[in-house]
Amino acid sequence: MTYSGVNRRKGPDLIVRIYHKLTAVTTVVNILLVTISGIAKPRNVTMFDRFADSTQKGGWDSELYSYLIYLILFQFIISATGLFLNYTRHHRKRDSYSLLLGGSLIISVIAGIYLLV
């Protein structure tokens, strides 16, 4: 039985719109993670620092480090939720999974293990 009436769809439904917004939020969180980790990590000791016998403050900035942990957890939750929504909407042949959300999920797991170990 085929339906030959008017297509009443006005655009993507709520789940697809949420899924696209989660992808955008994940992109912003990725940029924040790279920026904050660049600021929080300890400075490398160079040859000139050794020559001048300057003392270096060692270790990560603890406040920014805690922000990194929370952002990685937030990224994991957002990526997993987005992939779950993508999985529930994956019915047609032209539907595809988001590589950005999958990559963000993998990055958040690896970064979480790296920072917590």
Image (cartoon, rainbow, N blue to C red):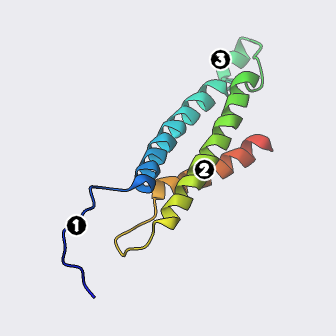
Say above or below: 112 vs 40: below
Q: Quadrant of the N terminus?
A: bottom left
Q: Quadrant of the C terminus?
A: top right
Q: Disc 2 marks which residue?
A: 107
Q: Disc 1 marks which residue?
A: 7
Badges 1 and 2: C-beta atoms under 8 Å apart? no
Disc 2 marks a residue whose amino acid type is Ile
Q: Counting residues from the N terminus, which is met first, the one under dot 3 or under dot 1?
A: 1
Q: Is disc 3 placed on a helix, strand or loop?
A: helix
**Image location (x, y in percent) of residue 19:** 46, 52
Q: Residue at x 66, y 23 (%)?
A: 46
CA–CA distance between discs 1 and 2? 40 Å
Q: Tell us which disc is closer to us: 2 or 3.
A: 2
Q: Disc 3 marks which residue?
A: 48
Say above or below: 3 vs 81: below
**Image location (x, y in percent) of residue 92:** 38, 74
Q: Counting residues from the N terminus, which is met first, the one under dot 2 or under dot 3?
A: 3
Q: Tell us which disc is closer to us: 1 or 2.
A: 1
Horizontal placement of 49 versus 97: left or right? right
**Image location (x, y in percent) of residue 49:** 69, 16
Q: Counting residues from the N terminus, which is met first, the one under dot 1 or under dot 2?
A: 1
Q: Which mark is residue 22?
A: none
